[in-house]
Amino acid sequence: MVNAVIRVAREIVIAWLIRVFTSNDVIRYQALELASREIKDKKIKGSIAELGVYKGDFAKRINVHFPDKTLYLFDTFNGFDKRDVEIEKKFNKNAKENDFMNNNIELVLKKMKYPENCIIKKGWFPETAKNIEERFAFVSIDADLFEPVYQGLLYFYERLEEGGYIFVHDYNGKLYGAKEAVQKFSKEYNIPYVPLSDICGTVVFSK
Ligand SMILES: C[S@@+](CC[C@H](N)C(=O)[O-])C[C@H]1O[C@@H](n2cnc3c(N)ncnc32)[C@H](O)[C@@H]1O
């Protein structure tokens, strides 16, 4: 009972923090708009994806900027997976299984201007990415934890069209291992990235 109350309270605080810290993130939103314009002007082919959708507040902006492109939405829609949380402990981070739980796909889709463009991939990434034959023009990786961010970079960079972009959120966040994942990927494959000065520190990979 006490554990359940603590879990619900933690969930409410997380949702509140996300709203407060990211709902007015002008730099993040303008960077997205600029990237989408580049992709449009240069007629970059490929679909769009977000890994780590939560309640869809960034995804709805992505959806608006790419009215003619398919948008894949990858999320457990039930919070962090215990396999990823286990790996996170190596980095002395305090992730909890099921942080970001209590999600609702219908509510996420209701926020979209072009819901018909959206393909929901519910479940644990990278399992949910199997059997997708796609190239991508723009990808947002916002899964917080080391393992899904690292797996996301491995998966999407290989499938990124030339001229496309990958935004990775939370590079500057201290709670989880996104930064370590970005650095490992960049070093291993010798692929540089550009950090932005938005609230949580997005980094941008391009091809
Ligand atoms: C910070 S929230 C996303 C916030 C959202 N992009 C926004 O700007 O409002 C992180 C999300 O990543 C999802 N996530 C983390 N690891 C995942 C994995 N391995 N597979 C699928 N979803 C995952 C969580 O369920 C959670 O909804």
Image: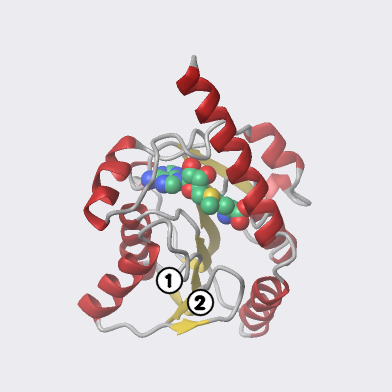
- Disc 1 marks a residue whose amino acid type is Leu
Q: Quadrant of residue 123?
A: top left
User: Residue 146, how many percent across, how many down?
Assistant: 33, 57
Determine the CA span between mark 1 and mark 2. 6 Å
Residue 176 screen position, x and y as percent: 40, 56
Q: Which residue is mark 2?
A: 164
Q: What percent of the width, then of the height, locates residue 121? A: 49, 41
Counting other residues with Cα less than 10 Å from the Cα at mark 1, is it few (<14), some (14-19), or many (20 or more)? Answer: many
Residue in the foreground of this view, choosing between 50 and 161: 50
Asked if the residues shown at circle 1 and circle 2 are in contact, with their CB atoms under 8 angstroms apart, the answer is: yes
Mark 2 lies within 8 Å of ligand 1 (Cβ measured): no
The quadrant of the picture occupied by the C terminus is bottom left
- Above or below, 12 against 65 in this view is above
Q: Which residue is mark 1?
A: 160
Q: Residue at x 71, y 35 (%)?
A: 107
At label 2, which amino acid type do we have? Gly
Q: Nearer the viewer, residue 94 or 130?
A: 94
The x, y position of residue 85, in whole percent, is 32, 43
Q: At x 65% / y 57%, what residue is drawn?
A: 58
